[in-house]
Image (cartoon, rainbow, N blue to C red):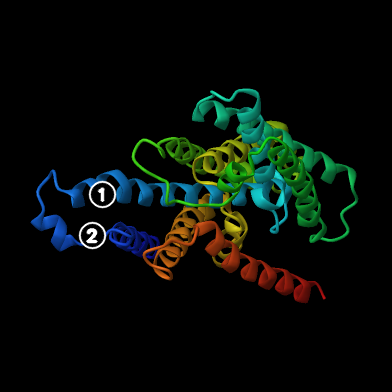
Amino acid sequence: MTKFLLAAAGVGLLAVLSLFVGATHLSPATLLAAGPESEAVRVLLASRIPRTIAVILSGMAMGVSGLIMQLIVRNHFVEPGTAGTVESASLGILLATLLAPGIDLIGKMTVAALCALAGTALFLFILSRIPLRSALLVPLIGLMLGGIFDSVTTFFAYRYDLLQSLNAWTTGDFSGVLRGRYELLWIAFALTAAAYLAADRFTVAGMGRDFTTNLGMNYRRAMSFGLVIVSMSTAVVVATVGTIPFLGLIVPNLVSMTVGDNARRAVPWVALGSAAFVLVCDLIGRTVRHPYEIPVGTIVGVVGSALFLYLLLRKGASDG
C-alpha cells in the first residue's frame, strides 16, 4: 500500500507540472498575483485543468482495456490497437459522419462503440478458427485485421474528402481539449471502475472456459462484459482525443512483470502507470518544440514501438 501511495503521489506531481507547461506562460506566482477574472485563471480553468484530467482518464482507460484484452485472449501481446478494436472504432466514427452528418459526439461514440464491439468479436472469432502454434501469431492476426479496417476507412475518407478529419481521429492529440469537450471521458473512468469491480471474474475467465465453468461462473457473460468495457472505453477515447498506440500493451506487461497476472492487484497499478506514462509523453510533446506541440500519439508511438520490440525479443529469447 505504501508503494502505491508513493506512486499515486508521483502521478499527482506530474499532473500539477502538466498544469504549468504550455504555449501560454503560467506559473503559481502569476496565479497568486492575478485576480479571479484574469487571463491566467481563465487559461487554467478552461484549458489546463481539462487537458490534465483528459490525459489521466484516457491513459487509465486504455491501459486497463489492454489488460482486459490480454486476460480475455490469454495473450500478453494483445491490446485494442493490436486487435482491430481501435481501427473498427475509427471506421464507426467515419460511418456516423457520412451517414448522419449532423450527429453529436455521443451519437458518434455510440456508433464507434458498436463497430469496435463487432470488430473485436470478429477478431475473437478468427482466433477460435485458427490453430495458434505461437503466441506471436495472435497480435499478427489482430494487426492484419486492423490493417483491413484501416484500409477501408482510408478509402472512404479519401472518396468523401474526409482524410483530414480521419487524421485527427487517428492521431492522439490533447491540444484541442477544452472545458466542455472532454467530459465524455468520465464514461471511460466509470468503465475503468467497473473493470476493477469485476477484476476477479476476468482473472478466472483468463484461465479458460472449462476452468471458469467448473467454478460455477458464466464464461460467456464474463467475456461479453469484458468486450463491452474494452469497446466502449476505446470508442470514447478515440472519439474524444484520438488513438494512443501501444499504451494498452506496454504498461500491463510491465505491471505483470512486477505484480503478476492477478487482475485485482494489477488494475490499480495499470491505471496509475498508464496515467503516468501518458502524462510524461504529453509533457515531452509540449516541451521539445515549445511553444509548438508534438501530438502525444506520436511520442507514445515512438516509445511504445521500441518497448514493443523489446517485449517481442524478450519473449522470443525465453521461448528459444
Image height of 96 relative to 54, above or below: above
Image height of 113 relative to 254, above or below: above
Which numbered tag is attached to residue 43? 1
Tell me what residue is drawn at x 68 percent, y 43 percent: 85
Where residue 188 sits in the image (x, y, percent)?
49, 39
**Which amino acid type is marked by label 2?**
Leu
Task: Examine the rendering and report whether any part of residue 41 can be seen.
Answer: yes
Q: Along the horizontal axis of the image, is 252 left or right of 118?
A: left
Where residue 218 sits in the image (x, y, percent)?
69, 32
Give 202 or 18, whichever is nearer the viewer.
18
Write down the residue under mark 2: 26
Image height of 190 relative to 110, above or below: below
**Which amino acid type is marked by label 1?**
Val
Q: Residues within 10 Å of mark 2 (few under 14, many from 20)?
A: some
Give 210 or 233, whichever is nearer the viewer.
233
Do the numbered discs 1 and 2 sit on residues whose CB atoms are within 8 Å?
A: yes
Instruction: Examine the image and state in which quarter residue 10 appears.
Output: bottom left
Q: Along the horizontal axis of the image, is 138 left or right of 275?
A: right
Q: Residues within 10 Å of mark 1 (few under 14, many from 20)?
A: some
Q: Along the horizontal axis of the image, is 130 left or right of 189?
A: right
Earlier-in-chain disc, 1 versus 2: 2
Quadrant of image for the C terminus: bottom right
Tell me what residue is drawn at x 66 percent, y 38 percent: 161
Where residue 65 sits in the image (x, y, percent)?
58, 47
Image height of 133 relative to 93, above or below: below
Tell me what residue is drawn at x 56 percent, y 53 percent: 244
Instruction: Examine the image and state in which quarter residue 211 appears.
Output: top right
Task: Examine the rendering and report whether any part of residue 224 can be seen.
Answer: no
Give 60 or 218, whichever is nearer the viewer.
60
Tell me the distance, in whole angstroms, between the alpha carbons under discs 1 and 2. 8 Å
